Image: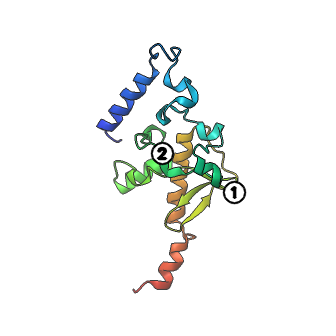
Amino acid sequence: MAKITELQKYARARKAKQAKPAAKGNGGKPAAARGAGAKSGARDIDHFIKTAGLDSQREKEIGQHIGYRYDVNLVPDYRRLTPFLRKYMEVMQWQDLNWLEDVHLGYEEGRAAVFDRNVNGWVTVPEGVKLPDNQQDRDMLARELLIKFQMSPRHPLVDLHKAYRKF
């Protein structure tokens, strides 16, 4: 598995510091319990499951969460890898999933979906798939779905390759 980086050490230390009871003036509650006044790092991990997730004025105007505003310190928890992703990393001889760190499960027209930048469109999760309750597990599922779709013969780039290849 991946080595623990300095960034991960910093994030863990920051999280441990936030979990300690705070000083006077805030009622002795940890940062996560202070509510709306807390910074984005102190949010509940299931914030987007329990709420609409539309936090900024722009998100409220367009009625959709802007996913690229995630905190870059929130690296994926590799203990939550799906069996497919674990095997994929092994076959590809990769130590991490850096290129998939910004892939998150979102919603398109009320259905769970993941955004595929190659085709500039949403790939919806099949209806029979049960979604996990934890956002990190949902994101791992989204990463798996995206990889499987991109390797699928049904991916739109396969048709483009057939139509425009030179050899």
Q: Give, as a three-letter code, the residue at label 2.
A: Tyr
**Mark 1 neighbour density, 10 Å: few (under 14) some (14–19) many (20 or more):** few
Q: Residue furthest left?
A: 6
Height in image: 84 above or below 20?
below
Q: Position of residue 27 (x, y in %)?
A: 53, 14
Q: Position of residue 16 (x, y in %)?
A: 41, 23
Looking at the rendering, in which quadrant would you find the N terminus? top left
Relative horizontal placement of residue 39, taking residue 50 as reference (left or right): left
Q: Give, as a three-letter code, the residue at label 1.
A: Glu
Looking at the image, which is closer to me, 74 or 132? 74
Q: Position of residue 155 (x, y in %)?
A: 55, 69
Query: Mark 2 falls on what kind of element?
Result: loop
Residue 91, located in which quarter of the rendered image?
A: bottom left
Relative horizontal placement of residue 92, taking residue 81 as reference (left or right): left
Residue appearing at x 40%, y 55% in the figure: 99
Number of marks in picture? 2
Residue appearing at x 54%, y 66% in the figure: 120
Looking at the image, which is closer to me, 39 or 98? 39
- Callout 2 touching callout 1 (CB < 8 Å): no
Height in image: 21 above or below 94?
above
Q: Which mark is residue 36?
A: none
> Marks 2 and 1, how far apart in space?
21 Å
Query: Mark 1 falls on what kind of element?
Result: loop
Height in image: 166 above or below 23?
below
Relative horizontal placement of residue 3, taking residue 138 as reference (left or right): left
Q: Earlier in the sequence, mark 2 or mark 1?
A: 2
Looking at the rendering, in which quadrant would you find the C terminus? bottom left
Q: Which mark is residue 70?
A: 2
Circle 1 sits on which residue?
Answer: 109
Residue 36, located in which quarter of the rendered image?
A: top right
Q: Position of residue 29 (x, y in %)?
A: 52, 17
Q: Residue furthest bottom?
A: 166
